[in-house]
Every structure is written in structure tokens, then in C-alpha cells.
Image (cartoon, rainbow, N blue to C red):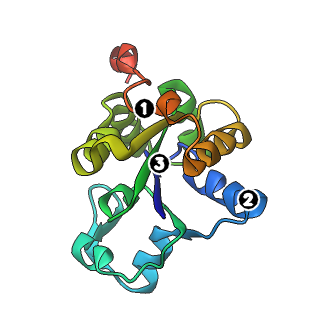
Amino acid sequence: MKIALTGTPGTGKTTIGKILRDRYGLKVVDINEVIRAHQYYAGWDEYRDCLIVDLEALRAHPFSEDLVLEGHLSHNLLVDRVIVLRTNPVALRRRLQQKAFSAKKINENVEAEILDVILVEALAQHGNAVYEVDSTGTLSESAQLVWEIIQGHWLERFVAGQCDWTAYLNDA
């Protein structure tokens, strides 16, 4: 089974991916490394300060079965299940500041989280195979919840649409 572990930057994808690898022995692939290693990009976006990813080339990459594809674009790939990590905008802003993101990039990502951008994209592509985990708390606890979804346990607890950050719109 291929699982996409996605979410706005700063929601804990990489840390949770490492926990899944170390604690549960899962094969976790950082799709950003795949993008760079295989040059699946068309250039650099000066405004957003990031690579312009060639999604068609990335989709054509021969990923093996039984793995977790970790990265904020992983929901754009052909997968069996999508897990979207969500983080309270206040906590997300703090995490992105700790990563030394620019103010512009922090604001863009916090707004994207409030407006459910990645969740909406994932639902449009994968429908009821999308699950949501609030990763505002400890990432170790969030990794346990992700593991439960991967195992198919209590999926109804994680249906998409449970995290509503719209109350933070005026603070963004």
C-alpha cells in the first residue's frame, strides 16, 4: 500500500516520517529528495523561493509498493491512502519561525493551513481515502495516530474536515 503523508510545511511530516521509519520499520521516502535527485523540476520560483516541480515527471517515477511518500506534494501522486497533517495556525507560525522561514513565507503557509489548501487538493484527487491528523501536540503522539490510519484502525476518527482553523483568519 502506498500512503501519502502530506500537509502544509511545518506540520511535522519529516519528523513523523522518521518516527514511522524508526519505531515501526516503515519504508518512508522523502519526495523532495526524489525531486532533487532526479531533477523533477522546471526551475526556481523567485517569488515563493522554491523549486517549480514537474508533477508529471514526479508522477511517472517508479515508486515501489508498501511505502510512505512524505512531502507536501505527496497527495498529488497515485496512492492508496492520504494522511493530511494539520496544525493550529498559532503553533504552525511558531514552528516556521523556528525554521527561520521569511515572514512572507510564514504568512503564506499559515494562510494555506487556515484555508485547508492541501486538504481540499487531497480530497479533490482522492475522495474518501483522505484522513486528517491534528499534529499540533507532540509529534510522537501524532505519529501513533498516523500509524493507526496506516493499519486501518478507527478510520472514522480521522475523517477529513475535523480541523477548522477559520477562526484564525483575522490573525493571519
Q: Is residue 72 above or below residue 157?
A: below
The answer for how far apart the CA atoms under marks 3 and 2 are is 23 Å
Q: Is residue 98 above or below residue 164?
A: below
Instruction: Determine if residue 99 is in view.
Output: no
Amino acid type at circle 2 is: Tyr
Classify mark 1: helix, strand or loop: loop
Q: Residue furthest right?
A: 23
Amino acid type at circle 3 is: Pro
Q: Residue 164 location, x and y as percent?
A: 40, 20
Within 10 Å of disc 3 (Cα), the crowding (few <14, some 14-19, many 20+) is many
Q: In the rendered structure, which disc, 3 or 2, sits on the residue that comes first in sequence?
A: 3
Classify mark 3: helix, strand or loop: loop
Q: Which residue is mark 2?
A: 24
Q: Residue at x 60, y 31 (%)?
A: 136
Nearest-to-viewer mark from 1 and 3: 1
Residue 9, disc? 3
Q: Residue at x 39, y 83 (%)?
A: 62
The answer for how far apart the CA atoms under marks 1 and 3 are is 21 Å
Q: Nearer the viewer, residue 151 or 145?
A: 151
Q: Residue 100 location, x and y as percent?
A: 56, 48
Query: Marks 1 and 3: CB-CB under 8 Å?
Result: no
Nearest-to-viewer mark from 3 and 2: 2
Q: Which residue is mark 1?
A: 159
